[in-house]
Image: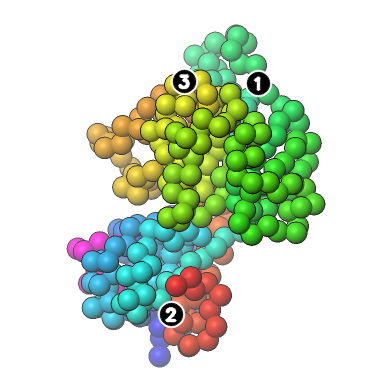
Amino acid sequence: MKIGVTVYSYREFDEAKWFHEFSREYGIELNVCEQAPCAENVLNAEGSLCIDILTSPMDRDLLERFYQCGVRYITTRTIGYDHIDIQAAKELGITVANAPYGANGVADYTLMLMLMSIRKMKCIMQRNIVQDYTLRGLQGRELADMTVGVIGTGRIGQAVIQHLSGFGCRIVAYDLYPNETVKQYASYVDLDTVWQESDLITFHAPLMDTNYHMLNQQTIGRLKEGVVLINTARGGLIDTQSLIEGIESGKIGAVGLDVIEEEFSLYYYDRKSDILQNRELGLLQSYPNVTISHHMAFYTDNYSKTVIRDSLQGCVYYAQGVDNPWVVA
């Protein structure tokens, strides 16, 4: 008997090939929906044991609706799963899993944002568009002269540190669970030392209640003047209003963001003709020293194949009742 899986936020242009290939290989009856899961399309999943989603918020009400349709397993095609109400899922008896992708894609992208930020690439590109080839205000910095603080040394944080080791910079790291491999390239320090000694800080921690807005007005006050901030993890790690105040005061010298707060209704949609309900994003985009992309550091050739493969294989493992390495709750 085939396993029923309904895929939400399905993309024909890059995901279709792999979904159809792996569903055939694993004996999965595939049902697809291009929209994100919502109350209006819950019934699309009727008859499916599993649903496969992206970063759409899954609150208690929505989870209850899916449970009533027979869904017992949710896999998210992402590393993070903070968009799912885990407690509600547990109480309902719905298993939640993720699909971690390779670390190098995000690590490469992080380094790109670092270099773009310290070399003022946004300003350089803007000047080139209008044929302004002057140099005033474009003098950059070199990584070898900087102390880089890495917050979070999981798979991606480790890859970033290994990449950075070739640039000759001093690297300090913070994590609740130090890793022996990291110690070859970086020194573990407490969080306050990261704030106070880093010329550049990059975030690679999962978002939890305990680290929500870990960078805020108080902690920004401890940072070096002109510090560079990079975030390719989760927007909620940084208090956006405090970030804006830090940029406008000159305390923060440059920022590279692949994630922001309140991004769920924006990213991956065509909103060019809409009035966006996110004033903070508009402000950040207006600053010459802030580079923003739309949560796509992960997006490589390798990502699409491996995430779809693992998300569907997790569905098979769940249906068969065998050990599933991707279960998070």
Mark 3 burial class by Cα count in 10 Å: few <14, some 14-19, many 20+: few
Between marks 2 and 1 in the image, the one whose residue lies nearer the viewer? 1
Between marks 3 and 1 in the image, the one whose residue lies nearer the viewer? 3
- Which image quarter holds the C terminus? bottom left
Measured Cα–Cα span from mark 3 to mark 1: 20 Å
Q: Is residue 180 above or below residue 20?
A: above
Tally of numbered tags = 3
Q: Which residue is at the front of the view, 112 or 81?
A: 81
Element marked by disc 3: helix
Mark 1 burial class by Cα count in 10 Å: few <14, some 14-19, many 20+: few
Query: Who's the residue at 62% across and 53% down the image?
Result: 175
Element marked by disc 2: strand
In the rendered structure, which amino acid carries the disc numbered 1? Gly
Task: Determine which quarter of the picture holds residue 223.
Answer: top right
Residue that badge 3 annotates: 249
| Position of residue 298 measured from the top left corner of the image (x, y, whole percent) | 54, 51
Tag 1 or tag 2, which sits nearer the N-term?
2
Q: Which residue is at the front of the view, 187 or 104?
A: 187
Q: Which circle marks residue 140 in the picture?
A: 1
In the rendered structure, which amino acid carries the disc numbered 3? Ser
| Position of residue 160 measured from the top left corner of the image (x, y, whole percent) | 66, 47
Residue that badge 2 annotates: 28
Tag 3 or tag 2, which sits nearer the N-term?
2
Mark 2 burial class by Cα count in 10 Å: few <14, some 14-19, many 20+: many
Query: Who's the residue at 56% across and 45% down the image?
Result: 203
Residue numbers of the magenta segment: 37-45
Measured Cα–Cα span from mark 2 to mark 1: 53 Å
Q: Residue 238, can we see it?
A: yes
Task: Determine which quarter of the picture holds residue 37.
Answer: bottom left
- Which image quarter holds the N terminus? bottom left
Q: Which residue is at the front of the view, 19 or 261?
A: 261
Element marked by disc 1: loop
